[in-house]
Image (tube, rainbow, N blue to C red):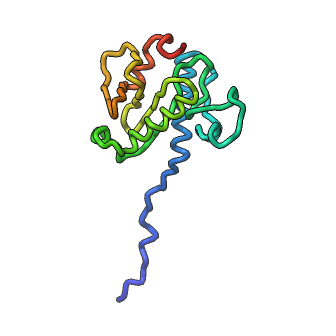
Amino acid sequence: MKDNYDLSNLRKKPKRKNSRRKGNNFELKIASILNERFKTTEFNRSPGSGAYATTHSLPEHLKIYGDLITPQNFRFCIECKKGYPKENLYSLYNNSSEFWGFIAQCEKDSVKSQRLPMVIFKQDRRPTLCIVPASVDFGVDQYLELHRDNQYYKMYLFDEALTSWDTNWFA
């Protein structure tokens, strides 16, 4: 007897991940965390996810840099990154890794916005990290020092950085 049954349709295909939606949701989550921490409603996702200022010709006082709209006296220009499973501890030693690209992207926006750069990075099932210039001191004992091309950074657990004084976050 010949087997004429095609069972290939019964195998489940892995669900496709929408990286844009994942990034948007992460930005909304970080805005919510910051709003709750600083008891405000001023943190919001940027229209166009940070690209709005570079793709639209707006007056300087209306330009938005980074992934989040922040209060006027907030010290940081924030770039949010979620996912990137290939990035790991060894990426810090690879000058062409996406990890260093995130920092470079944030630095460009921070110069334009006249704020300090902050990259908030999260991988699945890992704690959220934040990377800031080495001059920033959140008063947290545990952090990693990073450097590349005579530029120095600190990497904190985001939850621990949030425990620092408001004066470390606002000018």
Q: Residue at x 37, y 38 (%)?
A: 125
Q: Quadrant of residue 124?
A: top left
Residue 31 as seen in the image, left or right of residue 4: right
Coordinates of residue 92 in the picture (x, y in percent):
31, 38
Look at 42% across and 25% down and name the residue there: 132
* Image-based side of 86 in relation to 61, left or right: left
Q: How far from the left and from the top, in percent, is residue 122?
A: 42, 36
Residue depicted at 33% across the width and 42% down the height: 95
Between 158 and 2, the residue placed more toward the observer is 158
> Does 143 sit left or right of 71 as displayed?
left
Q: Is residue 145 above or below residue 57?
A: above
Residue pictured at 36% horizontal, 29% vertical: 151
Quarter of the image where one finds residue 127: top left
Q: Is residue 157 above or below residue 58?
A: above
Q: Quadrant of residue 157?
A: top left
Asked if one can make out residue 7 in the rendered structure from this viewpoint, the answer is: yes
Count of number-bearing discs: 0
The residue lying toward the viewer, choosing from 144 and 105, is 105
Q: Of residues 112 and 53, which is closer to you in this image?
A: 112
Dividing the image into 4 quarters, which one contains the N terminus?
bottom left
Give x and y (percent) for residue 24: 56, 40
Visible residue check, residue 155: no
Looking at the image, which is closer to me, 105 or 85? 105
Image quadrant containing the C terminus: top right
